[in-house]
């Protein structure tokens, strides 16, 4: 199943993009394909497919990295920023803060490429935006 | 509690452990059953609607035929009256009355059917919306579970490579430093390229004899020659 997703992602023409990346199935769950973006390997994009939807997520940080009492203010900033961020949104699952985007699993590889490129750029913007709230 | 609230409660409660279900398996089964039932209802409503519409079309066709026939007999009646054949005209009028009765019945039936069709269409749209709602809820559960699994895999992946000690802030700083380095390297490369282009130009000039030195030498030689001639 992941091989199908991997094959689909391999069709993306990196020559037309402003970032370079490598694709690799995650070691402990090969249904997740990691996009390792050159020069920002610290923030891999994790792509999975479910129910006709392709979800691209980047882990930003864990709640425990937040300064004491900072979360309310940071949430305000995140909610306000959500609308301005192209294609990506903030999310939280358990104690993990995420940046993610979702698109139809039938999307053209050009669109998937744009999603990845945008998410990679947004990730640095997003962490930069809330860096003051982090330890 | 709606499925959506349940999901959000589960996520907020930190139910991100591997294998921990967002909603219990029983509920997922019930949802699947509800989707199947609603889909069956939609199919039934759709075929019922098709039957009603076919029936309505039949009555409408019949009504048109009757209308045509009535007009035809009205023509005959006028002709009979023109010929002064009163008894025939009455006979024709009776026929027209019969046809009109039949037409009234058809029109009534058509109206009744149109009402039923409207109701059935409402019911169908309602059932279809129910299916969409159930499917959306099922999708919420599946998507959340996938996202949870990914998060769990990410956490254990990080621990496995030992890179968890790097927090996001440090990572961001490192990424930015590396990108700055690359930008500097690019700039240096550009400068280097510009320099080599410069020396290329010097070589070309020399090839064409347009060097600073050759100019000086010829000037000197000219001066010397001028001296000699004096």
Image: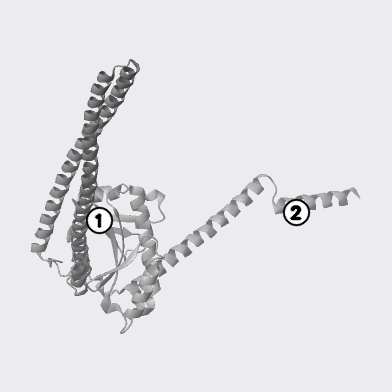
Q: Secondary structure at mark 2?
A: helix
Residue B69 vertical position relative to residue B139 in the rendered view, above or below: above
Near mark 1 (Cα within 10 A), the count class, few <14, some 14-19 or many ≥20, is some
Contact between marks 1 and 2 (CB within 8 A): the answer is no
| Residue A35: mark in rendering | none
Residue A42, percent across and down?
Answer: 31, 66
- Which chain hosts label 2? B
**Would residue A51 be seen by someone viewing this image from the given angle?**
no
Q: Say which residue appears at 69% left-offset and 46% top-offset.
A: B209
Q: Say which residue appears at 52% left-offset and 58% top-offset.
A: B190
Residue B47, percent across and down?
Answer: 16, 41
Residue, disc 1? A24
| Residue B216: mark in rendering | 2
Residue A56, percent across and down?
Answer: 29, 59
Quadrant of the rendered structure where residue B46 is?
A: top left
- Which chain hosts label 1? A
Q: Which dot, 1 or 2, sits closer to the camera?
A: 1
For the residues labelled 1 and 2, the Cα–Cα distance comes to 66 Å
């Amino acid at each position: 199943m992941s091989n199908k997703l991997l094959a689909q992602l391999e069709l993306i023409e990196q020559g037309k993009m402003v970032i370079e990346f490598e694709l690799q199935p995650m070691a402990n769950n090969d249904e997740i394909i990691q996009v390792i973006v050159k020069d920002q390997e610290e923030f891999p994009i994790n792509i999975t497919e479910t129910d006709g939807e392709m979800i691209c997520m980047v882990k930003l940080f864990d709640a425990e990295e937040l300064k004491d009492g900072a979360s309310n203010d940071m949430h305000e900033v995140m909610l306000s920023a959500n609308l301005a961020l192209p294609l990506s949104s903030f999310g939280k699952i358990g104690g993990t803060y995420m940046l993610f985007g979702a698109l139809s699993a039938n999307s053209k590889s050009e669109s998937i490429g744009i999603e990845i490129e945008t998410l990679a750029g947004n990730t640095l913007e997003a962490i930069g935006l809330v860096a003051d709230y982090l330890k | 509690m709606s499925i959506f609230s349940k999901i959000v409660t589960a996520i907020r409660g930190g139910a991100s452990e591997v294998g921990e279900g967002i909603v219990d398996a029983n509920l997922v089964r019930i949802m699947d059953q509800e989707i199947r039932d609603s889909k069956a209802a939609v199919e039934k409503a759709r075929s019922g609607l098709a039957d009603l519409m076919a029936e309505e079309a039949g009555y409408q066709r019949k009504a048109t035929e009757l209308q045509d026939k009535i007009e035809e007999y009205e023509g005959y009646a006028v002709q009979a009256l023109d010929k002064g054949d009163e008894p025939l005209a009455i006979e024709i009028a009776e026929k027209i009355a019969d046809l009109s009765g039949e037409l009234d019945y058809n029109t009534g039936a058509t109206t009744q059917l149109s009402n039923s069709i409207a109701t059935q269409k409402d019911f169908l749209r309602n059932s279809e919306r129910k299916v969409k709602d159930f499917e959306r809820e099922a999708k919420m559960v599946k998507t959340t579970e996938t996202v949870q699994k990914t998060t769990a895999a990410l956490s254990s992946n990080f621990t496995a490579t030992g890179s968890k000690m790097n927090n996001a802030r440090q990572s961001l700083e490192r990424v930015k430093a590396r990108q700055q380095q690359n930008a500097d390297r690019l700039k240096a490369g550009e400068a280097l390229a510009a320099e080599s282009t410069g020396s290329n130009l010097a070589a070309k000039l020399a090839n064409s004899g347009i060097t600073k030195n050759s100019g000086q030498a010829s000037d000197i030689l000219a001066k010397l020659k001028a001296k000699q001639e004096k």
